[in-house]
Image (cartoon, rainbow, N blue to C red):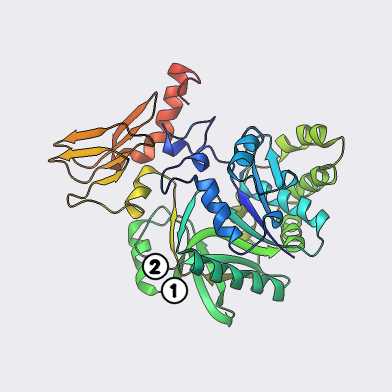
Amino acid sequence: MRHAVIMAGGAGTRLWPLSRMARPKQMLRLLGGKSLMRQAYERVAALLPADSIYVITGTRYLPLVAQEVPEIPEDNLFGEPHGRDTANAIGLAAAIIQHRDPQAIMGIFTADHLITPVDRFVAALDAAYGVAERQAEALVTLGVRPSSAHTGYGYIRRGRAIGDRSYVVEEFTEKPDLARASDYVTSGCYYWNSGIFTWRATTILDQLRRHLPKSHDGLTAIAEQWNGSERAATLERVWPSLIKISIDFGVMERAEHVLVVEMDCNWVDLGSWTSFESMVSADADGNVNAAIATLNLGSRGNILVSEDDHLIATIGVDDLVVVHSPDATLICTKRDAQSIKELVTRVRQQFGERYV
């Protein structure tokens, strides 16, 4: 049976001041009036029923997730005490689901992607599930044909075609410099790494056993107690001991039988405010107005963001990011937007938890 796991654990520090510890970025209604969490669910629900969809998130966010996606059964919402990166989030979900369905085929998604159109996404996803069903040992990733030499994304080099819209993966490259990214795009042999996967639950657990054996054993122990009285005690004992590592570094770059299926979609990883330049059409002066009320006078190339009807007005400024929230406002140049994580650390040091 096909299952889907949506990872929704990150706090989204780079989207401060709208994204906060109490309301992370996947809960923000930044585009289309729906949260990123809700949009992620609806994309997957176009192919799978709600009782086959799961969410793994921070324990503190479980009530928020339940509110955003009430269709998903409560037993399908998994809480992590704190983040230990994607290898452990995926491994825990795989171990729990495999207990419920030993023949499970899993899709892995994140709640901070924007993907359109949905019908083409569903077609690619259906193909990727099919590959995982027919090839028991395969780890399948979905790749996006790059539209630019983006240096903030990982890249996948495809090899020979094996049918089913799939190719052998020859190499992963994490965030290349501009020169290499340009070469990759020109070659036509590379995809952006979407971070979306399909595989058998037993296959990914076997790969974790091979490449991250301590994590595998710990996650298996947690899963065995998931529906028992010792769940909390086992989580408290085991979870902090798990090595913090991504599924890409921990498994995908080490595994042998890795395939890629092309996802013919518009895809954006909402990792920073500058991502909005790929999602929102700019005005005649290049301003991206992701807010209800904006006014720009002699200003060019700015990104203006707000969830409410607070007016953001600019005069004679260029290439800024301006983000309004009820109790904090961010103003920075676009080139400095990647330093927001450092800024949030300084905010916490000076003001405690009030603004984070």
Element class at badge 2:
helix
Residue at x 58% of width, y 65% of height: 141
Determine crowd level at label 1: few under 14, some 14-19, many 20+ residues with C-alpha closer than 10 A.
Answer: some
Q: Is residue 190 visible?
A: yes
Picture quadrant where residue 313 is located: top left
Q: Is residue 239 left or right of residue 66?
A: right
Q: Amino acid at mark 2?
A: Tyr
At mark 1, the secondary structure is: loop
Residue most toward the right? 229
**Disc 1/disc 2 C-alpha distance (Å):** 7 Å
Q: Is residue 207 above or below residue 137?
A: above
**Vertical arrangement, residue 195 with respect to residue 124, above or below:** above
Q: Quadrant of residue 198?
A: bottom right
In the displayed structure, would residue 15 be above or below residue 91? above
Residue at point 68%, 34% (across, down)? 81
Residue 253 seen in the current view: no
Asked if residue 120 lies left or right of residue 9, the reply is: left
Residue lying at the far top in this picture: please name it.
Answer: 351
In the image, what residue occupies the spot 80% across and 46% down? 223
Q: Position of residue 44 (x, y in %)?
A: 59, 59
Residue 218's x, y, as percent?
78, 44
Q: Which residue lies under the disc numbered 2? A: 184
Residue bearing mark 1: 189
Residue 111 x %, y %: 54, 49
- Kindly identify the residue that appears in the image at 19 percent across and 35 percent down: 314
Residue 293 - label: none
